[in-house]
Image (cartoon, rainbow, N blue to C red):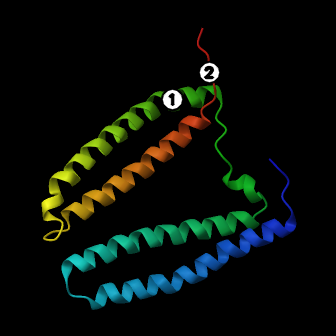
Amino acid sequence: MKQLSDEWWATVVHEFRQHVREETAFLDAYEALATDIRDRSVQLLLELILSDEHRHHEMFKSLADASVSDGGADSLKAPRLDAEQGARLRDPTERFLAAEREESKKLAALRRELRPLRHQTLWPLLVELMEMDTAKHIRILEFLQEQLPDVTTE
């Protein structure tokens, strides 16, 4: 791993911690608004945001903690799988990736089908959000595939 300066580390740690501090205020504001609004659809949408923001908050706390721990960047380094673990991960990752790509196509088609309802229901938006989650899953699985060791079978 490239040696990074103390100044670089200080900047990164500061950014992680700053994000945690700033996000705390947003979380409180979202929670207050979600409890104040009586419209169930708006509450649902705010709850979706809150769920993501809580997860992001925890991730940034983990990043901040990891960046100052003894391991530094090594504590959240990219996976380095041995051949056995790579072999165990290869087939499921390929199956999951194929399934997520197929799901992406189905969700896109469903979203297009629901387009006439975009001003009457949340359905098109919720399907679009699921498409975004599916794109995230695909990216994670692609990353895992990139990390798999090259194993040649004889």
Along the polypeptide, which appears first: circle 1 or circle 2? 1
Q: Amino acid at mark 1?
A: Arg
Q: Residue furthest top?
A: 154
Which of the numbered marks, if any, corresponds to residue 101?
A: none
Place of residue 114 in the rendered image (x, y in percent of width and height, measured from the top left): 16, 57
Q: Give the labeled residue for mark 1.
A: 90
Place of residue 50 in the rendered image (x, y in percent of width and height, measured from the top left): 39, 75
Q: For this rendering, which residue is in front, 112 or 59?
A: 112
Number of other residues with Cα within 10 Å of mark 1, as a class: few under 14, some 14 to 19, many 20 or more: some
Which of the numbered marks, if any, corresponds to residue 151?
A: 2
- In percent of the image, x 55 and y 42: which residue is there? 143
Q: Which quarter of the rendered picture does the C terminus lie within?
A: top right
Place of residue 65 in the rendered image (x, y in percent of width and height, measured from the top left): 68, 68
- In percent of the image, x 36 and y 41: which residue is there? 100
Q: For this rendering, which residue is in front, 20 or 142?
A: 142
Looking at the image, residue 7 sits to the left or right of residue 58; the answer is right
Q: Amino acid at mark 2?
A: Val
- In percent of the image, x 47 and y 67: which residue is there? 55
Q: In what element is the residue under mark 1?
A: helix
